Amino acid sequence: MARKQNSSRDDREKPNFWLFSISFLFIRFNLLPFYFTRFLRETYTFSSAREIFLWRLNIYTFVILLRFEFFKRSNGGSSIKILGLVGSPSVNGNTAKLVNAILDGAAENGAEKVIYNLASLNIKGCDACFRCRESGCCAIDDDMQELYQEIQAADTIVLGSPVYMWQMTAQTKLLIDRLTAFLKPDFSSRLDNKKLILVFSQGSSDRDAFKPYFEYTAGLLYYLGFDVLETVIVAGTDNLEVSFRPKLLEKARELGKLVSGSPLSGSEFRKEESSLIPLL
Ligand SMILES: Cc1cc2nc3c(=O)[nH]c(=O)nc-3n(C[C@H](O)[C@H](O)[C@H](O)COP(=O)(O)O)c2cc1C
């Protein structure tokens, strides 16, 4: 079973969920004004009918405001799902902090966030059986099965890796190889232009040092059927770790907000809003 971190899907376990549901039932069936007025009548002696009327008015205004809040939540709320995949063995390292910051920004916009650390999962290498070509399903029974579902369910994916030996980490590459299951026999993709943000962190302070490799990787992800919105590169972590760069983390949060709030497709997003995307 894959190990999921920071999931906000377990809302039922939080007391807020039940508070919200019970309040909803009360409001839905107008029970709140009824019980509250009865309570007031039993507790206080009202001097005039006008006083009772004003109390009722207050309660109804309150209920209308609450209903408006429910309406807002159900319509503009958390319909977007954002999935973070971190390919670093450092569970709380530079890459994880960046991916988390992007996810947090999206969550501020009401998105549902889920994050996995690839190094903590059991992901085997592709064994080239090619059974996925026809069926679309990988035959290897490991944690990748859960990730296939998460990827299909997500609107946006944030894939992060540190640079190891001029490339992505081995853990990230295991995932990439297994994404071949999303290709049909004619090598077209089974994915419907799923949005993706690519995140790289590197020790070297030369931000252009691996640029061709990052572009090449973004190209591969396009080929697999992802719509790569942006490649975020954080350089110089050998000198200064991400946790000591609050402005950078803030920019990452802003990017998460921007992506989750935008109804635009990937190509439109790049065309219309690329000037707003921070260069990290
Ligand atoms: C085995 C290994 C190889 C690395 N290779 C490179 C490299 O080729 N270029 C580079 O700039 N940094 C390299 N680094 C540094 C990492 O990319 C850098 O520290 C990164 O921010 C680590 O991210 P993390 O904290 O998420 O693991 C390497 C680090 C390790 C452990």
Image (cartoon, rainbow, N blue to C red):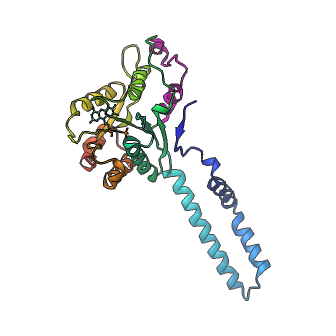
Q: In the depicted view, which residue is nearer to us: 4 or 16?
A: 4
Task: Kindly indicate the quadrant of the structure image that contains residue 66.
Answer: bottom right
- In the picture provided, is 273 more to the left or to the right than 124? left
Rendered view: 42 above or below 134: below
From the image, give the main secondary structure of the stretch colored magenta. Answer: helix
In the rendering, at what x and y percent does residue 40 appear?
A: 74, 77
Q: Is residue 94 left or right of residue 166?
A: right
Q: Going by the picture, which residue comes out furthest to the top?
A: 129
Tell me what residue is drawn at x 36 percent, y 27 percent.
Answer: 225
Q: Position of residue 54 (x, y in %)?
A: 64, 80
Q: Which quarter of the figure is the N terminus placed in?
A: top right
Q: Is residue 156 above or below residue 148?
A: below
Which contiguous range is marked in magenta? 130-153
Instruction: Identify the residue at the far right of this view.
Output: 42
Q: Residue at x 46, y 31 (%)?
A: 119
Residue 207 image offset from top left, x and y in percent: 22, 40
x 35%, y 43%: residue: 264
- Determine the residue located farthest toward the front in the rendered image: 239
- Residue 139 position, x and y percent, is 52, 16
User: In the rendered structure, does residue 147 fall within the stretch colored magenta?
Assistant: yes
